[in-house]
Image (tube, grey):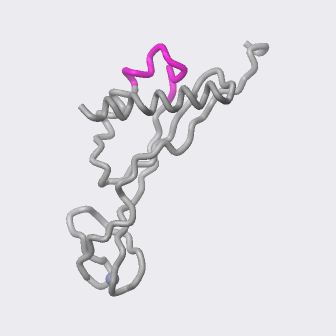
Amino acid sequence: MHELSIANSLVEIASEHARANGGQRILAITVRVGPLSCVHKSALEFSFDLLKQGTMLEGAQLKWLDVPVTVFCPTCEREVELPGIQRFRCPECDTPSGDIRSGRELDLETIEICQQATADA
Ligand SMILES: [Zn+2]
């Protein structure tokens, strides 16, 4: 299951980042995901919940930032947003376009670290 390896690298990157910043714990991570990334969110959430146990991400929330699919339309000469991934045609002028500009994303966008000093605990 490739979601498992994605979740694994998310946990690793976030843990490394938290350590480098002297953070205690990670509260949440936000992942930018496009409809063409071929990732099943529910499978990734499941894997993430499994892998975060016993790490700095234990209890952390996985948040999604949905990226729309955009293609470059040669007729309109600009990037246009597609309403879905069934038809790769410009919604304005109906020109077919396979020139995908966004929608394949799967990026770790933000990592929220708990910066609370241990004195407070
Ligand atoms: Zn167009």
Residue 54 screen position, x and y as percent: 48, 13
Task: Tell me: residue 57, above or below residue 31.
Answer: above
Residue 79 screen position, x and y as percent: 41, 74
Which residue in the rendered view is the most extreme toward the left? 86
At horizontal 52% and vertical 45% (from top left) the residue drawn is 109
Q: Quadrant of residue 20 in the image?
A: top right
Q: Quadrant of residue 10 in the image?
A: top left
At horizontal 39% and vertical 62% (from top left) the residue drawn is 102
At horizontal 28% and vertical 41% (from top left) the residue drawn is 40
Q: Quadrant of residue 42 in the image?
A: top left
Residue 25 screen position, x and y as percent: 60, 22
At horizontal 61% and vertical 28% (from top left) the residue drawn is 18
Task: Tell me: residue 42, above or below residue 93.
Answer: above
Is residue 51 highlighted in magenta? yes
- Magenta range is 49-60
Q: How many marks?
A: 0
| Quadrant containing ligand 1 | bottom left
Q: Quadrant of the C terminus?
A: top right
Q: Which is nearer the eye, 43 or 101?
A: 101
Q: Quadrant of the N terminus?
A: top left
Which residue in the rendered view is the most extreme toward the right? 119
Q: Give the main secondary structure of the magenta stretch.
A: loop
Residue 80 screen position, x and y as percent: 38, 74
Task: Tell me: residue 34, above or below residue 114.
Answer: below
Is residue 85 highlighted in magenta? no
